[in-house]
Amino acid sequence: MLETNGQRLWDSLMAMAEIGATANGGSSRLALTDEDAAGRSLFVQWAEAENLTISRDAIGNLFARRAGRDDVPPVVIGSHLDTQPKGGRFDGVLGVLAALEAVRTLNENEIETVAPIEIANWTNEEGARFTPAMLGSSVFTGAMTLDDGLAREDANGQSVAESLQATGEAGATPLARKYDAYFEAHIEQGPVLEDNDKTIGVVTGGQAIRWLDVRFTGKAGHAGTTPMPVRRDALFAASAAITAVEEYVAGIDGLLATVGEFHVAHGSRNTIAADVHFTLDLRHPEDDVVDRAIDTIRARFDERLPSRDVDYDLSLHWRSPALPFDETCVRHVRDAAQGLGYAWQDIISGAGHDAFHLAKHCPTAMVFIPCADGLSHHEAESIEPEHAKYAADVLLNAALARAGHV
């Protein structure tokens, strides 16, 4: 089994973290901003130093290819360099730079692979600037049309197309090119590996995810002159609805619900709220459980809200089905972890990843390592340097097993 240079990988991670560095030790590189472009530029500089061929596609996905002996579909390894507004230093970036470190190790050991190995940096994985999340991989695989992806706008009304033009990150590499396989390394973003004292998670698949938009519409009125019995208070109704969701989810093992955004339109201290919108994120390893949850939540709203004389609308914003990863690719990851002697376990991904879209395009698997206290999407996100090396080691050996070597 080959091993990577852990210090070199850590130095690369720390150098990338300086781009968009935040006051409390995190990173902020929203997709297709100047900071993201600077991070991409640094990656390209490093990749070109390894004699990799750089290309981009029409949605801005960035690729760095190491030639193989044969002109066949590549084995692709990677993740994303964009972050949350005040995100951590490792979410996504570990996968890209662990892939780079894997290639550096192949080069310094003069190992020729049969299939090319290509590093991918996917556009707007986080969904923090443009929705939905995993936009670049979605367009690449055909889950979203290119026109739809390019038309998506941020909160300031700037589109993906405009941002690609501003940063120069659009290219002409064909979408939906054939891949032999895809491997992605990532921090777990949860506490399971740490709690179980494991350093490698062999990811066997991903949870079902549903993003819902919920809107309550009542009637505005004066806070001091409108009696409580006649009020049509959208905010009180929305609060009761959220409580109903929490009560229901608490009784279903493995079901997760999150209200990540909450907005009161035209909010004023002395005015009854008339228009309230919130987002609801539902997740579970099984699609049927999540879909039943949506039906049940709607039924509970119908049951509890009529007395408030408030209207509501619950709509599906985005659907990501549960999916198993390819058994052969998963076995390559498991064999690498075992062969290297790293403590490992099988695990289901609780978060969404570009690998979910790629799994519908080619054989796919993922590698997880622990993050301190399971914390992610936060400036305090932290991993152990040796664990970063372990991720790169497993990624390298799994990809090499798939690509073959001369």
Image: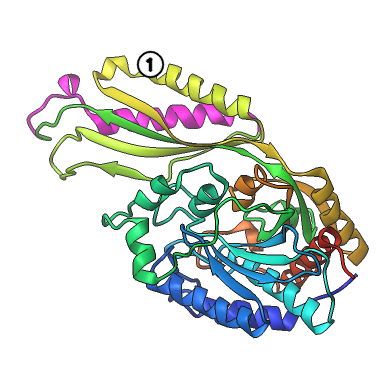
Q: Residue furthest left?
A: 225
* Residue at which label 1 appears: 302
In the displayed structure image, the side of residue 308 where residue 42 appears, left or right: right
Q: Which residues are magenta?
A: 224-253
Amino acid type, mark 1 = Asp
Split into 4 quadrants, where in the image is the N terminus? bottom right
Q: Position of residue 54 (x, y in %)?
A: 58, 73
In the foreground, 392 or 271: 392
Q: Position of residue 48 (x, y in %)?
A: 61, 81
Quarter-of-image position of residue 55: bottom right
Q: Is residue 232 magenta?
A: yes
In the foreground, 348 or 147: 147
In the displayed structure image, the side of residue 370 where residue 302 appears, left or right: left
Can I make out residue 15 in this image?
A: yes
**Secondary structure category for the residue under label 1:** helix
Q: Position of residue 221 (x, y in %)?
A: 11, 31
In the displayed structure image, the side of residue 348 where residue 329 appears, left or right: right
Q: Main secondary structure of the magenta part?
A: helix
Q: Residue at x 73, y 74 (%)?
A: 103
Q: Position of residue 199 (x, y in %)?
A: 78, 61
